[in-house]
């Protein structure tokens, strides 16, 4: 999802940053001007701060993306959202999130998203954005095969980690969460009941229509 967008020297906001590993990788790889990760969980943000407090240009804030985002108007060049479908799975939450994203994104700024969709590539958030006149769809690509391939490659290491460090009562849940082969998530993608897409949106520049 980052492949064709310039991140170097840009201000980036990640919605639903999780444990922060992806954010830290992006900062090391692309050298943005600033990178802010937000998450609704205080425990998650505490973990991020403990793990990456010494990483330059990287910060983390507790915030609910379905409400007000504490950033200035047109202050972010890129908003990134990876696997955050559950954050905006209802139309009211989607509208609130999109309104705030439009406010904080610069003109020509990018919204980068990837996650699970229906078999036709539809999703509440993506469908609403596609119909929204504020954005242009630059790319929409089905990457289900890539995701399944990655899960196959990571199977041994993930299964070993769960076996070593997760309590027996929680292993089935962790397997489902990580999408191990044989789980419902993996099987749904493999058998065509769900798809994984990446989408790149670009915010339009407003133009003032002259009065005649």
Image (spheres, grey):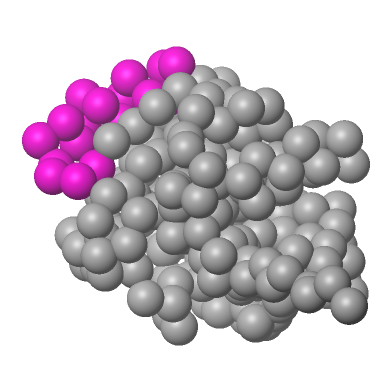
Magenta residues, dominant SS class: helix
Q: What residue is rendered at 16% in x and 31% in y? A: 53
* Residue at point 31%, 25% (across, down): 47
- Left or right side of 78 for 24: left
Q: Residue at x 44, y 60 (%)?
A: 77
Tell me where residue 50 sits by quadrant.
Answer: top left
Direction from residue 163 to residue 204 in the image, left or right: right
For the magenta stretch, what is the residue range? 42-58
User: Is residue 164 visible to us here?
Assistant: no
Residue 45: image location, x then y, percent: 38, 24
Seen in the image, is 34 located left or right of residue 143? left
Q: Nearer the viewer, residue 26 or 103?
A: 103
* Residue at image location 13% in from the left, 44% down from the top: 56
Residue 63 higher or lower than 89, as above or below: above
Q: Which percent across, then down, holds residue 22?
A: 36, 52
| Residue 157, position as x, y percentages in the image | 35, 56
């Amino acid at each position: 999802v980052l492949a064709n967008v310039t991140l170097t020297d840009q201000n980036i906001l990640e919605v639903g940053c999780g444990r922060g590993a992806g954010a830290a990788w992006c900062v090391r790889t692309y050298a943005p001007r600033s990178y802010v990760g937000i998450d609704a969980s205080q425990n998650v943000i505490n973990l991020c701060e403990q793990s990456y407090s010494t990483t330059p240009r990287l910060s983390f804030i507790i915030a609910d993306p379905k409400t007000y985002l504490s950033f200035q108007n047109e202050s972010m060049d890129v908003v990134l959202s990876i696997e955050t479908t559950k954050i905006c799975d209802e139309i009211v939450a989607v509208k609130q999130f999109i309104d705030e994203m439009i406010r904080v994104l610069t003109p020509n700024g990018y919204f980068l998203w990837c996650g699970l969709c229906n078999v036709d590539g539809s999703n509440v958030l993506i469908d609403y954005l596609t119909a929204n006149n504020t954005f242009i769809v630059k790319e929409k690509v089905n990457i289900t095969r890539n995701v399944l391939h990655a899960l196959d490659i990571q199977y041994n290491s993930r299964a070993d980690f769960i076996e070593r460090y997760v309590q027996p009562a929680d292993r089935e849940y962790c397997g489902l969460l990580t999408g191990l082969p044989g789980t419902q998530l993996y099987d749904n993608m493999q058998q065509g009941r769900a798809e994984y897409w990446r989408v790149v949106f670009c915010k339009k520049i407003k133009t003032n229509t002259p009065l005649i």
